[in-house]
Amino acid sequence: MVPQAAGLPTLTPAMSTTLTPATSTTLIPATSTTFIPKFRHSLAGCPTLVPCDCLNETIDCGSRRLVSAPQFRQHNLPFDKLKLNNNHMTTVTNLTFTGLKVTEINLSFNRITTIDDDAFSGLETILRVLNLKFNHLTSLPKAVFTLQNIEELDISHNRIISADQVDGHFLLMKKFLASGNLLPQWPNWLNRLPFLEELDLSYNPVSTFPDNLSDLQWTLHKVTLDNCQFHKIPQELSQLQRLEFLDLSFNPIGDRGILYDSFHGQSGSLKELLLQGINITAVPKALGSLSSLKKLDISDNNLGFIREDILPGQLTEVIMKRCGLHRIPATLSDLKNLKSLELANNHIHSIESHDLTGLSNLINLDLSSNNLQHVSPWAAVNLTRIQNFWLFDNKLTDLPAVVQKFQSLKELNLEANPLQCTCRDGWPAVWITRHPSVEVKGYCENLGGLDALKFISNYNHYCSV
Protein backbone atom coordinates (compact mmCIF):
# COMPACT_ATOMS: atom_id res chain seq x y z
CA MET A 1 0.00 0.00 0.00
CA VAL A 2 1.34 3.39 -0.99
CA PRO A 3 1.60 5.70 2.05
CA GLN A 4 -0.68 8.70 1.98
CA ALA A 5 1.09 12.03 1.85
CA ALA A 6 0.89 13.94 5.09
CA GLY A 7 -1.79 16.58 5.25
CA LEU A 8 -3.95 15.12 2.48
CA PRO A 9 -7.34 13.50 3.19
CA THR A 10 -7.70 9.79 2.53
CA LEU A 11 -10.50 8.95 0.12
CA THR A 12 -12.42 5.87 1.31
CA PRO A 13 -15.37 4.13 -0.35
CA ALA A 14 -17.68 5.59 2.25
CA MET A 15 -16.65 9.05 1.24
CA SER A 16 -17.21 8.48 -2.47
CA THR A 17 -20.34 9.80 -4.13
CA THR A 18 -22.20 8.21 -7.04
CA LEU A 19 -23.62 10.68 -9.51
CA THR A 20 -27.16 9.82 -10.58
CA PRO A 21 -29.09 11.58 -13.36
CA ALA A 22 -30.89 13.58 -10.74
CA THR A 23 -27.77 14.74 -9.05
CA SER A 24 -25.40 14.96 -12.00
CA THR A 25 -24.00 18.36 -12.95
CA THR A 26 -23.31 19.60 -16.48
CA LEU A 27 -19.63 20.50 -16.77
CA ILE A 28 -19.09 23.81 -18.57
CA PRO A 29 -15.58 24.22 -20.02
CA ALA A 30 -13.64 27.07 -18.53
CA THR A 31 -13.03 30.04 -20.77
CA SER A 32 -9.80 29.31 -22.67
CA THR A 33 -6.94 31.77 -22.58
CA THR A 34 -4.93 32.37 -25.78
CA PHE A 35 -1.19 32.18 -25.21
CA ILE A 36 0.85 34.49 -27.38
CA PRO A 37 4.45 33.28 -27.62
CA LYS A 38 7.48 35.50 -28.04
CA PHE A 39 7.75 34.54 -31.71
CA ARG A 40 4.84 34.28 -34.12
CA HIS A 41 5.35 30.55 -34.30
CA SER A 42 3.32 27.40 -33.81
CA LEU A 43 3.71 23.78 -34.80
CA ALA A 44 0.66 24.13 -37.00
CA GLY A 45 1.76 27.30 -38.71
CA CYS A 46 5.55 27.05 -39.02
CA PRO A 47 7.47 24.16 -40.60
CA THR A 48 10.30 24.22 -38.04
CA LEU A 49 10.62 23.53 -34.33
CA VAL A 50 13.05 26.43 -33.92
CA PRO A 51 11.17 29.54 -32.72
CA CYS A 52 11.05 31.48 -35.98
CA ASP A 53 8.62 34.10 -37.21
CA CYS A 54 6.28 32.66 -39.83
CA LEU A 55 4.23 35.44 -41.28
CA ASN A 56 3.23 36.83 -44.68
CA GLU A 57 4.64 33.91 -46.67
CA THR A 58 8.05 34.28 -44.95
CA ILE A 59 9.86 31.96 -42.55
CA ASP A 60 12.11 34.34 -40.63
CA CYS A 61 14.87 32.59 -38.66
CA GLY A 62 17.22 35.55 -38.91
CA SER A 63 19.19 36.93 -35.95
CA ARG A 64 18.61 33.82 -33.80
CA ARG A 65 22.30 33.03 -33.12
CA LEU A 66 21.88 29.74 -34.97
CA VAL A 67 25.05 27.75 -35.65
CA SER A 68 23.26 25.52 -38.14
CA ALA A 69 20.05 25.61 -40.12
CA PRO A 70 16.99 24.21 -38.33
CA GLN A 71 15.23 21.06 -39.48
CA PHE A 72 12.22 21.66 -41.67
CA ARG A 73 9.24 19.34 -41.78
CA GLN A 74 7.09 18.55 -44.80
CA HIS A 75 4.26 21.00 -45.17
CA ASN A 76 1.76 22.48 -47.60
CA LEU A 77 1.90 26.01 -46.25
CA PRO A 78 2.35 28.93 -48.70
CA PHE A 79 5.85 30.06 -47.65
CA ASP A 80 7.95 31.62 -50.43
CA LYS A 81 10.87 33.12 -48.50
CA LEU A 82 13.32 31.79 -45.92
CA LYS A 83 15.52 34.13 -43.86
CA LEU A 84 18.56 32.72 -42.07
CA ASN A 85 20.58 35.93 -42.15
CA ASN A 86 22.59 37.34 -39.24
CA ASN A 87 23.34 34.02 -37.57
CA HIS A 88 26.54 32.12 -36.72
CA MET A 89 26.33 29.42 -39.38
CA THR A 90 29.59 28.10 -40.88
CA THR A 91 28.32 25.20 -43.00
CA VAL A 92 25.21 24.46 -45.04
CA THR A 93 24.95 20.67 -45.12
CA ASN A 94 23.33 18.32 -47.63
CA LEU A 95 19.53 18.22 -47.72
CA THR A 96 19.28 21.25 -45.42
CA PHE A 97 16.14 22.57 -47.08
CA THR A 98 14.28 19.29 -47.52
CA GLY A 99 10.54 19.84 -47.11
CA LEU A 100 10.59 23.46 -48.26
CA LYS A 101 9.30 24.94 -51.52
CA VAL A 102 10.64 28.45 -51.08
CA THR A 103 11.70 30.63 -54.02
CA GLU A 104 14.02 32.90 -52.01
CA ILE A 105 16.70 32.12 -49.38
CA ASN A 106 18.70 34.72 -47.45
CA LEU A 107 21.91 33.39 -45.85
CA SER A 108 23.71 36.73 -45.65
CA PHE A 109 25.80 37.91 -42.70
CA ASN A 110 26.81 34.47 -41.44
CA ARG A 111 30.24 32.84 -41.28
CA ILE A 112 29.68 30.28 -44.00
CA THR A 113 32.81 28.67 -45.44
CA THR A 114 31.26 25.51 -46.90
CA ILE A 115 28.07 24.66 -48.76
CA ASP A 116 27.72 20.95 -49.48
CA ASP A 117 27.00 19.84 -53.03
CA ASP A 118 23.43 18.71 -52.29
CA ALA A 119 22.54 21.53 -49.89
CA PHE A 120 19.76 22.78 -52.17
CA SER A 121 18.38 19.36 -53.05
CA GLY A 122 14.68 19.65 -53.86
CA LEU A 123 14.98 23.33 -54.81
CA GLU A 124 16.87 22.92 -58.09
CA THR A 125 13.98 24.20 -60.22
CA ILE A 126 12.19 26.21 -57.52
CA LEU A 127 14.71 28.65 -56.02
CA ARG A 128 14.83 32.04 -57.75
CA VAL A 129 16.79 34.28 -55.34
CA LEU A 130 19.84 33.35 -53.24
CA ASN A 131 21.63 35.83 -50.98
CA LEU A 132 25.08 34.77 -49.71
CA LYS A 133 26.67 38.17 -49.13
CA PHE A 134 28.98 38.84 -46.18
CA ASN A 135 30.16 35.28 -45.56
CA HIS A 136 33.57 33.58 -45.73
CA LEU A 137 33.32 31.70 -49.04
CA THR A 138 36.49 31.39 -51.14
CA SER A 139 34.88 29.93 -54.26
CA LEU A 140 31.43 29.73 -55.76
CA PRO A 141 30.01 26.46 -54.37
CA LYS A 142 29.05 23.65 -56.77
CA ALA A 143 25.64 23.54 -55.11
CA VAL A 144 24.83 26.96 -56.55
CA PHE A 145 25.25 25.64 -60.09
CA THR A 146 22.50 23.07 -59.48
CA LEU A 147 19.94 25.89 -59.29
CA GLN A 148 18.63 25.77 -62.82
CA ASN A 149 16.13 28.64 -62.55
CA ILE A 150 18.02 31.05 -60.31
CA GLU A 151 17.35 34.68 -61.26
CA GLU A 152 19.23 36.65 -58.59
CA LEU A 153 22.50 35.62 -56.98
CA ASP A 154 24.34 37.81 -54.46
CA ILE A 155 27.81 36.65 -53.35
CA SER A 156 29.08 40.12 -52.43
CA HIS A 157 31.71 40.63 -49.72
CA ASN A 158 33.10 37.13 -49.43
CA ARG A 159 36.66 36.02 -50.18
CA ILE A 160 35.94 34.42 -53.52
CA ILE A 161 38.91 34.08 -55.85
CA SER A 162 37.20 31.84 -58.40
CA ALA A 163 33.64 31.83 -59.71
CA ASP A 164 34.13 29.70 -62.79
CA GLN A 165 31.31 27.41 -63.73
CA VAL A 166 31.56 23.73 -62.89
CA ASP A 167 28.30 22.21 -64.08
CA GLY A 168 24.99 23.52 -65.31
CA HIS A 169 24.17 27.01 -66.44
CA PHE A 170 22.09 29.95 -65.30
CA LEU A 171 19.89 30.52 -68.31
CA LEU A 172 17.39 32.66 -66.37
CA MET A 173 19.91 34.74 -64.37
CA LYS A 174 18.88 38.42 -64.28
CA LYS A 175 21.05 39.83 -61.49
CA PHE A 176 24.57 38.81 -60.44
CA LEU A 177 26.16 40.73 -57.57
CA ALA A 178 29.76 39.88 -56.62
CA SER A 179 31.15 43.11 -55.17
CA GLY A 180 33.99 42.98 -52.67
CA ASN A 181 35.66 39.69 -53.55
CA LEU A 182 39.05 38.71 -55.00
CA LEU A 183 38.00 37.84 -58.54
CA PRO A 184 40.93 38.47 -60.91
CA GLN A 185 38.84 38.14 -64.06
CA TRP A 186 35.37 38.14 -65.50
CA PRO A 187 33.72 34.73 -64.71
CA ASN A 188 33.68 32.68 -67.91
CA TRP A 189 29.94 32.02 -67.89
CA LEU A 190 28.69 35.58 -67.44
CA ASN A 191 28.78 36.47 -71.12
CA ARG A 192 26.46 33.56 -71.94
CA LEU A 193 23.46 34.72 -69.92
CA PRO A 194 20.75 35.82 -72.35
CA PHE A 195 18.58 37.48 -69.67
CA LEU A 196 21.19 39.18 -67.48
CA GLU A 197 20.05 42.71 -66.56
CA GLU A 198 22.32 43.80 -63.70
CA LEU A 199 25.99 43.02 -63.01
CA ASP A 200 28.15 44.19 -60.09
CA LEU A 201 31.85 43.25 -60.01
CA SER A 202 33.00 46.30 -58.07
CA TYR A 203 35.88 46.05 -55.58
CA ASN A 204 37.48 43.13 -57.43
CA PRO A 205 40.89 43.16 -59.18
CA VAL A 206 39.20 42.67 -62.56
CA SER A 207 41.02 44.45 -65.40
CA THR A 208 39.68 42.96 -68.65
CA PHE A 209 36.41 42.21 -70.43
CA PRO A 210 35.62 39.11 -72.51
CA ASP A 211 35.76 39.76 -76.24
CA ASN A 212 32.24 38.60 -77.04
CA LEU A 213 29.27 40.09 -75.16
CA SER A 214 26.72 39.52 -77.91
CA ASP A 215 24.41 37.48 -75.64
CA LEU A 216 24.17 40.45 -73.28
CA GLN A 217 23.80 43.28 -75.76
CA TRP A 218 20.01 43.63 -75.55
CA THR A 219 19.40 42.81 -71.86
CA LEU A 220 22.25 44.12 -69.68
CA HIS A 221 21.27 47.63 -68.53
CA LYS A 222 23.22 48.14 -65.28
CA VAL A 223 26.97 47.52 -64.85
CA THR A 224 28.91 48.45 -61.70
CA LEU A 225 32.70 48.20 -62.00
CA ASP A 226 34.00 50.79 -59.55
CA ASN A 227 37.22 50.15 -57.65
CA CYS A 228 38.56 47.57 -60.09
CA GLN A 229 41.81 47.66 -62.12
CA PHE A 230 40.70 48.97 -65.52
CA HIS A 231 43.29 51.21 -67.20
CA LYS A 232 40.95 52.20 -70.01
CA ILE A 233 37.26 52.23 -70.89
CA PRO A 234 36.76 48.68 -72.19
CA GLN A 235 35.98 48.77 -75.92
CA GLU A 236 33.84 45.67 -75.41
CA LEU A 237 31.27 47.90 -73.67
CA SER A 238 30.25 49.19 -77.09
CA GLN A 239 28.45 45.87 -77.63
CA LEU A 240 25.97 46.64 -74.84
CA GLN A 241 23.31 48.50 -76.80
CA ARG A 242 20.81 48.82 -73.92
CA LEU A 243 23.19 49.88 -71.13
CA GLU A 244 21.57 52.58 -68.96
CA PHE A 245 23.82 52.70 -65.87
CA LEU A 246 27.62 52.47 -65.81
CA ASP A 247 29.92 53.00 -62.82
CA LEU A 248 33.67 52.97 -63.54
CA SER A 249 34.65 55.13 -60.58
CA PHE A 250 38.05 54.80 -58.93
CA ASN A 251 39.74 52.87 -61.70
CA PRO A 252 43.21 54.04 -62.86
CA ILE A 253 41.92 55.07 -66.30
CA GLY A 254 43.43 58.51 -66.87
CA ASP A 255 42.92 60.84 -69.85
CA ARG A 256 44.49 58.40 -72.31
CA GLY A 257 42.17 55.63 -71.26
CA ILE A 258 39.09 57.34 -72.72
CA LEU A 259 38.86 57.48 -76.50
CA TYR A 260 36.53 59.68 -78.53
CA ASP A 261 34.31 56.68 -79.34
CA SER A 262 34.56 54.94 -75.94
CA PHE A 263 30.79 55.23 -75.41
CA HIS A 264 29.77 54.82 -79.03
CA GLY A 265 27.54 51.82 -78.34
CA GLN A 266 25.64 53.65 -75.59
CA SER A 267 25.06 56.94 -77.41
CA GLY A 268 21.30 56.57 -77.17
CA SER A 269 20.88 54.39 -74.08
CA LEU A 270 23.19 55.49 -71.25
CA LYS A 271 21.36 57.56 -68.62
CA GLU A 272 23.72 57.49 -65.60
CA LEU A 273 27.50 57.61 -65.79
CA LEU A 274 29.78 57.61 -62.75
CA LEU A 275 33.44 58.44 -63.35
CA GLN A 276 34.63 59.49 -59.91
CA GLY A 277 38.34 59.42 -59.21
CA ILE A 278 39.55 58.01 -62.55
CA ASN A 279 42.58 60.35 -62.75
CA ILE A 280 41.37 62.58 -65.58
CA THR A 281 42.30 66.26 -65.90
CA ALA A 282 39.62 67.22 -68.44
CA VAL A 283 36.02 66.29 -69.14
CA PRO A 284 36.20 63.58 -71.84
CA LYS A 285 35.05 64.59 -75.33
CA ALA A 286 33.41 61.18 -75.56
CA LEU A 287 30.61 62.44 -73.31
CA GLY A 288 29.31 64.60 -76.12
CA SER A 289 27.89 61.57 -77.92
CA LEU A 290 25.69 60.50 -75.01
CA SER A 291 22.39 61.96 -76.13
CA SER A 292 20.31 60.30 -73.37
CA LEU A 293 22.60 60.98 -70.41
CA LYS A 294 20.73 62.38 -67.38
CA LYS A 295 23.21 62.00 -64.50
CA LEU A 296 26.97 62.57 -64.57
CA ASP A 297 29.30 62.24 -61.58
CA ILE A 298 32.95 63.15 -62.27
CA SER A 299 33.88 64.03 -58.70
CA ASP A 300 37.37 63.44 -57.31
CA ASN A 301 39.14 64.34 -60.55
CA ASN A 302 41.56 67.27 -60.79
CA LEU A 303 39.73 69.07 -63.59
CA GLY A 304 40.62 72.64 -62.75
CA PHE A 305 39.05 74.09 -65.91
CA ILE A 306 36.20 72.79 -68.06
CA ARG A 307 35.92 73.57 -71.76
CA GLU A 308 32.79 75.04 -73.32
CA ASP A 309 30.16 72.87 -75.02
CA ILE A 310 31.51 69.60 -73.67
CA LEU A 311 28.61 68.39 -71.51
CA PRO A 312 25.49 66.72 -72.94
CA GLY A 313 22.70 69.30 -72.98
CA GLN A 314 19.97 67.03 -71.62
CA LEU A 315 21.66 66.42 -68.24
CA THR A 316 19.42 66.82 -65.18
CA GLU A 317 22.04 66.05 -62.48
CA VAL A 318 25.74 66.98 -62.43
CA ILE A 319 28.12 66.19 -59.56
CA MET A 320 31.61 67.76 -59.56
CA LYS A 321 32.78 67.54 -55.98
CA ARG A 322 36.50 67.75 -55.17
CA CYS A 323 37.50 68.65 -58.72
CA GLY A 324 39.84 71.55 -57.96
CA LEU A 325 37.51 74.09 -59.59
CA HIS A 326 38.33 77.76 -58.97
CA ARG A 327 35.20 79.12 -60.59
CA ILE A 328 31.80 77.90 -61.70
CA PRO A 329 32.17 76.42 -65.20
CA ALA A 330 30.42 78.64 -67.75
CA THR A 331 29.30 75.62 -69.75
CA LEU A 332 26.88 74.71 -66.95
CA SER A 333 24.65 77.59 -67.99
CA ASP A 334 23.85 75.70 -71.19
CA LEU A 335 22.24 72.83 -69.32
CA LYS A 336 18.65 74.04 -69.52
CA ASN A 337 17.22 70.82 -68.04
CA LEU A 338 19.53 70.72 -65.02
CA LYS A 339 17.73 70.07 -61.72
CA SER A 340 20.58 69.26 -59.34
CA LEU A 341 24.12 70.68 -59.29
CA GLU A 342 26.75 69.70 -56.71
CA LEU A 343 30.00 71.69 -56.69
CA ALA A 344 30.98 71.12 -53.06
CA ASN A 345 34.58 70.85 -51.84
CA ASN A 346 36.19 72.95 -54.57
CA HIS A 347 38.06 76.27 -54.45
CA ILE A 348 35.37 78.62 -55.76
CA HIS A 349 35.79 82.13 -54.29
CA SER A 350 32.69 83.85 -55.63
CA ILE A 351 29.45 83.53 -57.55
CA GLU A 352 29.44 86.25 -60.19
CA SER A 353 26.57 87.85 -62.05
CA HIS A 354 27.21 85.78 -65.19
CA ASP A 355 27.26 82.44 -63.32
CA LEU A 356 24.43 79.92 -63.48
CA THR A 357 22.30 81.97 -65.86
CA GLY A 358 19.60 80.14 -67.75
CA LEU A 359 19.17 77.32 -65.21
CA SER A 360 15.47 77.92 -64.74
CA ASN A 361 14.80 74.27 -63.83
CA LEU A 362 17.44 73.99 -61.10
CA ILE A 363 16.06 72.76 -57.77
CA ASN A 364 19.15 71.82 -55.73
CA LEU A 365 22.41 73.83 -55.67
CA ASP A 366 25.28 72.70 -53.44
CA LEU A 367 28.34 74.94 -53.09
CA SER A 368 29.31 73.78 -49.62
CA SER A 369 32.93 73.64 -48.44
CA ASN A 370 34.35 76.00 -51.00
CA ASN A 371 36.09 79.28 -50.27
CA LEU A 372 33.10 81.47 -51.04
CA GLN A 373 33.42 85.04 -49.82
CA HIS A 374 31.08 86.83 -52.22
CA VAL A 375 27.76 86.12 -53.92
CA SER A 376 26.70 88.73 -56.45
CA PRO A 377 23.11 89.98 -55.91
CA TRP A 378 22.65 89.61 -59.69
CA ALA A 379 23.96 86.05 -59.87
CA ALA A 380 21.66 83.14 -60.65
CA VAL A 381 18.70 85.46 -61.18
CA ASN A 382 16.87 82.88 -63.27
CA LEU A 383 16.81 80.22 -60.58
CA THR A 384 13.08 80.65 -60.05
CA ARG A 385 12.50 77.00 -59.08
CA ILE A 386 15.40 76.48 -56.69
CA GLN A 387 14.34 74.91 -53.40
CA ASN A 388 17.60 74.01 -51.67
CA PHE A 389 20.61 76.36 -51.60
CA TRP A 390 23.51 74.85 -49.65
CA LEU A 391 26.40 77.16 -48.76
CA PHE A 392 27.66 75.25 -45.72
CA ASP A 393 31.29 75.76 -44.62
CA ASN A 394 32.33 78.87 -46.55
CA LYS A 395 33.55 82.35 -45.62
CA LEU A 396 30.36 84.36 -46.13
CA THR A 397 29.67 87.12 -43.63
CA ASP A 398 26.26 88.22 -44.92
CA LEU A 399 23.06 86.60 -46.02
CA PRO A 400 23.24 86.48 -49.87
CA ALA A 401 20.83 89.10 -51.22
CA VAL A 402 20.21 86.95 -54.29
CA VAL A 403 17.89 84.69 -52.25
CA GLN A 404 15.23 87.41 -52.49
CA LYS A 405 14.68 86.26 -56.07
CA PHE A 406 14.23 82.58 -55.15
CA GLN A 407 10.46 82.33 -54.91
CA SER A 408 10.42 78.54 -54.30
CA LEU A 409 13.21 78.37 -51.72
CA LYS A 410 12.73 75.89 -48.86
CA GLU A 411 16.19 75.63 -47.28
CA LEU A 412 19.15 78.00 -47.07
CA ASN A 413 22.11 76.41 -45.30
CA LEU A 414 24.74 78.88 -44.11
CA GLU A 415 26.14 76.83 -41.25
CA ALA A 416 29.90 77.05 -40.59
CA ASN A 417 30.11 80.55 -42.08
CA PRO A 418 31.37 83.59 -40.08
CA LEU A 419 28.01 85.40 -40.34
CA GLN A 420 27.94 88.96 -38.98
CA CYS A 421 24.39 89.79 -37.94
CA THR A 422 24.08 93.57 -37.87
CA CYS A 423 21.36 96.20 -38.06
CA ARG A 424 22.68 98.03 -41.10
CA ASP A 425 20.37 96.27 -43.56
CA GLY A 426 16.80 95.28 -42.83
CA TRP A 427 15.93 93.42 -46.04
CA PRO A 428 16.37 89.92 -44.49
CA ALA A 429 13.63 90.70 -41.94
CA VAL A 430 11.24 91.79 -44.69
CA TRP A 431 12.18 88.75 -46.80
CA ILE A 432 11.60 86.19 -44.05
CA THR A 433 8.24 87.79 -43.26
CA ARG A 434 7.16 87.20 -46.84
CA HIS A 435 8.64 83.68 -46.89
CA PRO A 436 8.15 82.33 -43.35
CA SER A 437 8.42 78.68 -44.44
CA VAL A 438 12.07 79.02 -45.54
CA GLU A 439 14.42 77.13 -43.23
CA VAL A 440 17.50 79.26 -42.67
CA LYS A 441 20.42 77.44 -41.02
CA GLY A 442 23.35 79.41 -39.65
CA TYR A 443 24.70 81.24 -36.62
CA CYS A 444 25.73 84.82 -35.89
CA GLU A 445 29.43 84.71 -35.09
CA ASN A 446 29.42 88.27 -33.73
CA LEU A 447 26.52 87.53 -31.36
CA GLY A 448 27.97 84.51 -29.63
CA GLY A 449 26.47 81.93 -31.96
CA LEU A 450 22.91 83.26 -31.93
CA ASP A 451 20.68 81.43 -34.38
CA ALA A 452 20.61 83.52 -37.57
CA LEU A 453 16.96 82.79 -38.24
CA LYS A 454 16.08 83.97 -34.74
CA PHE A 455 17.95 87.23 -35.35
CA ILE A 456 16.27 87.81 -38.72
CA SER A 457 12.80 86.95 -37.44
CA ASN A 458 13.24 89.28 -34.43
CA TYR A 459 15.13 92.02 -36.24
CA ASN A 460 13.09 94.83 -34.71
CA HIS A 461 13.71 93.50 -31.23
CA TYR A 462 17.47 93.25 -31.63
CA CYS A 463 17.80 96.48 -33.62
CA SER A 464 15.37 98.73 -31.74
CA VAL A 465 16.80 102.10 -30.80
Image (cartoon, grey):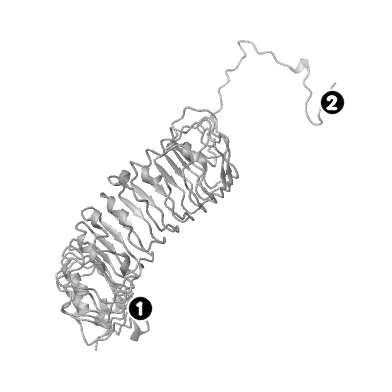
Tell me the CA gap for discs 2 and 1.
Answer: 88 Å
Residue 107 picture location, percent across and down: 50, 45
Amino acid at circle 1: Ala
233, above or below 134, in the image: below
Counting other residues with Cα less than 10 Å from the Cα at mark 1, is it few (<14), some (14-19), or many (20 or more)?
Answer: some
Front-lying residue, 213 or 92: 213
SS type, badge 2 = loop
7, above or below 69, in the image: above
Counting other residues with Cα less than 10 Å from the Cα at mark 2, is it few (<14), some (14-19), or many (20 or more)?
Answer: few
351, above or below 6, in the image: below
Residue 255 picture location, percent across and down: 31, 69
Q: Please, which residue is most extreme toward the top here? A: 21
Q: Residue 90 — which label?
A: none
SS type, badge 1 = loop
Q: Residue 3 — which label?
A: 2
Pick the quarter of the image with the C terminus. bottom left
Q: Is residue 130 left or right of residue 272?
A: right
Q: Mark 2 against mark 1, which lies toward the viewer?
A: 1
Q: Residue at x 49, y 32 (%)?
A: 100
Q: Residue 416 — which label?
A: 1
Residue 258 visible (yes or no) = yes
Q: Name which of mark 2 and mark 1 comes first in the sequence.
A: 2
Front-lying residue, 398 or 217: 217
Amino acid at circle 2: Pro
Q: Quadrant of residue 150?
A: top left
**Tag 2 and tag 1, C-beta contact below 8 Å:** no
Residue 86 picture location, percent across and down: 53, 49
Front-lying residue, 256 or 90: 256
Q: Residue at x 17, y 70 (%)?
A: 333
Pick the quarter of the image with the N terminus. top right
Q: Is residue 465 left or right of residue 200?
A: left
